[in-house]
């Protein structure tokens, strides 16, 4: 990808959509689980995403819930290593491989765009790819032949700042870059497996879906003020909303284009969803 060239004319038919995807529980798609079919529908959904795109991505930008920094950090190495940042799983899950290349020129373009929006950013040549990136991409793009750059969340967890970052990164969509937010629409570790949280997750998911599908200005207002949603803090406990914030980035990058829920399933007694914009 030559990010130094002038961006091609805007063509909404080939503009990349943005996605918020659930990345599951650790390496869940690559191991036995109880119940055994818990993640099958989510895996099938992730495997089908590439076929819905208007064209093959030139590169992929992943905003992962598993990387927080003081500002927006960006992987800039040509071959980042994998970070197995999950614990207590079978030994073979620490031997999973996803040998995608990095893209230093895209990393530079990302930091430039963030800087133009007065958002502090930092290129990190030594940071690897965490499982919020490689676990879902092993299903979505199994050949690992598309370069990937990962962008951190900001440790202040400010939804408005993350929405603004998405708006700054929006031009990349017309340069063939697929922007993915990798997290979970419901992420309360104490709630998984507890049937009492089924209705709670349903309530929050219904609100979140309506917010995503609202007109762009209203969508921004609702998502930035997400803590006022029904069951918000039961779905994402205080100071633990990092799995929701990638949604703010991809919604910001969507601009005025519509959003919709494209997947939903009941997993571990809770409702988990995915959203597409554009």
Image (spheres, grey):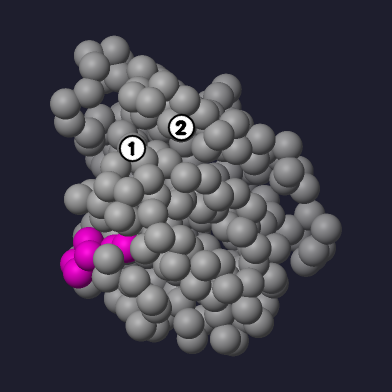
Q: Which of marks 1 and 2 is nearer the N terminus?
A: 1
Residue at 54%, 75% in the rendered image: 211
Magenta segment's dominant SS is loop
The image quadrant that residue 164 belongs to is bottom left
The answer to whether residue 163 is magenta is no
Question: For the residue carrying disc 2, how many other residues have a C-alpha within 10 Å: few (<14), some (14-19), or many (20+)?
Answer: many
Marks 1 and 2 in Cβ contact (< 8 Å): yes
Write the start and end of the magenta stretch as one range.
235-240
Quadrant in which the N terminus is drawn: top right
The answer to whether residue 236 is magenta is yes
Percent from the top left, x then y, of residue 55? 76, 43
The image quadrant that residue 89 belongs to is top left
The single residue placed furthest to the top in the displayed view is 92
Q: What element carries label 1?
A: loop
Nearer-the-camera pick, 104 or 54: 54
Q: What element carries label 2?
A: loop
According to the image, label 1 marks what residue?
A: 25
Percent from the top left, x then y, of residue 119? 36, 75
Residue 39 is tagged as: 2
Question: For the residue carrying disc 1, how many other residues have a C-alpha within 10 Å: few (<14), some (14-19), or many (20+)?
Answer: few
Residue at 57%, 86% in the rendered image: 218
Percent from the top left, x then y, of residue 102? 44, 37
Front label number (1 vs 2): 2
The single residue placed furthest to the front in the displayed view is 196
Q: Is residue 105 above or below residue 236?
A: above
């Amino acid at each position: 990808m030559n990010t130094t060239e002038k961006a091609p004319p805007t063509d909404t038919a080939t503009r990349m959509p943005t996605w918020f995807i659930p990345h599951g529980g650790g390496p869940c798609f690559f191991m036995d689980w109880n119940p055994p079919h818990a993640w099958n529908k989510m895996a099938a959904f992730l495997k089908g995403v590439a076929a819905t795109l208007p064209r093959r991505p030139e590169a992929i930008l992943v905003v992962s819930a598993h990387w927080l920094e003081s500002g927006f950090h960006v992987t800039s190495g040509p071959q980042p290593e994998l970070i197995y940042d999950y614990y207590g799983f079978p030994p073979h899950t620490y031997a999973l491989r996803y040998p995608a290349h990095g893209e230093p020129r895209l990393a530079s373009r990302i930091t430039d765009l963030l800087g133009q929006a007065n958002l502090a950013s930092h290129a990190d040549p030594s940071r690897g790819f965490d499982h919020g990136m490689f676990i879902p991409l092993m299903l979505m793009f199994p050949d690992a032949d598309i370069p990937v750059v990962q962008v951190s969340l900001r440790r202040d967890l400010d939804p408005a700042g993350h929405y603004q970052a998405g708006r700054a990164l929006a031009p990349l969509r017309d340069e063939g870059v697929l922007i993915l937010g990798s997290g979970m629409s419901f992420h309360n570790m104490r709630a998984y497996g507890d049937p009492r949280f089924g209705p709670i997750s349903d309530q929050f998911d219904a609100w979140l879906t309506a917010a995503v599908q609202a007109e762009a200005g209203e969508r921004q207002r609702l998502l930035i003020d997400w803590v006022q949603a029904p069951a918000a803090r039961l779905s994402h406990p205080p100071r633990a909303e990092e799995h929701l914030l990638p949604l703010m980035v991809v919604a910001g990058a969507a601009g005025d284009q519509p959003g919709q829920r494209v997947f939903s399933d009941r997993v571990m007694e809770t409702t988990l969803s995915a959203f597409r914009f554009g």
